[in-house]
Image (cartoon, helix red, strand yellow):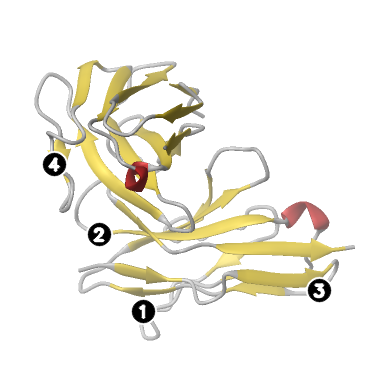
Amino acid sequence: AQRVTQPEKLLSVFKGAPVELKCNYSYSGSPELFWYVQYSRQRLQLLLRHISRESIKGFTADLNKGETSFHLKKPFAQEEDSAMYYCALRGTSYGKLTFGQGTILTVHP
Amino acid sequence: SAVISQKPSRDICQRGTSLTIQCQVDSQVTMMFWYRQQPGQSLTLIATANQGSEATYESGFVIDKFPISRPNLTFSTLTVSNMSPEDSSIYLCSVIYHQGTDTQYFGPGTRLTVL
């Protein structure tokens, strides 16, 4: 079985502060991990994926297989980063994404 | 990126009735999926909509309750049958444009409330 855990439902930081959204997963094979974001009144959209090892909007995420984690980080949070963030895992079943519960990030001015 | 539309965007329905949700994509896609997001919960995959054949349902979801059609490569419908208040959720259509890419795009969702 595959499972994704985001331990924090709510996360508040001030503008310019570092932010880390935690994600832990459980999967017996080699998973693909993703971060999705949903801004207010917008649809769910892909933020980044571990395969690409890219930085999007200043966010990065590293897959740590030893700790089974895929935490999302940004060194300097901006107010426009306020949104709901979902960590998701894809195993062997192509297309099937297992989502975490989501973390609401609020960046205060 | 994909342009995915869903109809209706929201609805309030009576217990025991059925609602059909439509998903339209701007171009042909390889795979289409239906997800559910219950209040305060995360997204859960209901089924994969297969073009020209029966949908593939995830554990806990059955065709009699959630019949799905996909007559072509750009359109799919999900029906929520014999609704109860527990079916109140956001239902999302999702697509992958072509195999070999891992980007899954999501529609805006349909917010369903069952009284």
Asked whether the residues under the numbered discs 3 and 4 touch, taking CB atoms below 8 Å apart as contact, a structural biologist would say no
Q: Amino acid at mark 3?
A: Ala
Closer to the chain start, of discs 3 and 1, is 3
Q: Chain of mark 1?
A: A
Vertical comparison of B84 with A69: above or below:
above
Vertical comparison of B49 with B77: above or below:
below
Under tag 2, what secondary structure?
loop
Q: Residue placed at 17% from the left, 28% from the top?
A: B50
Give the quarter of the image for residue A26: bottom left
Under tag 3, what secondary structure?
loop
Asked whether the residues under the numbered discs 3 and 2 touch, taking CB atoms below 8 Å apart as contact, a structural biologist would say no
* Crowdedness near tag 2: few (<14), some (14–19) or many (≥20) residues, C-alpha within 10 Å: some
The Cα atoms of the two marked residues, 1 and 4, are separated by: 35 Å
Judged by depth in the image, the label closer to the viewer, 3 or 1, is 3
Badge 3 and badge 1 in a common chain: yes
Badge 2 and badge 1 in a common chain: yes
The location of residue B60, given as percent across then percent down, is 17, 52
Judged by depth in the image, the label closer to the viewer, 2 or 1, is 2
Find disc 4 in the rendering and name its residue. Answer: B62
Label ID, residue A24: none
**Relative horizontal placement of residue B47, taking residue A66 as reference (left or right):** left
Q: Amino acid at mark 2?
A: Gly
**Relative horizontal placement of residue B32, taking residue B94 as reference (left or right):** left
Q: Amino acid at mark 4?
A: Val
Q: Residue placed at 50% from the left, 23% from the top?
A: B3
Find disc 2 in the rendering and name its residue. Answer: A91
Q: Residue placed at 51% from the left, 26% from the top?
A: B9
Label ID, residue A65: 1
Judged by depth in the image, the label closer to the viewer, 1 or 4, is 4
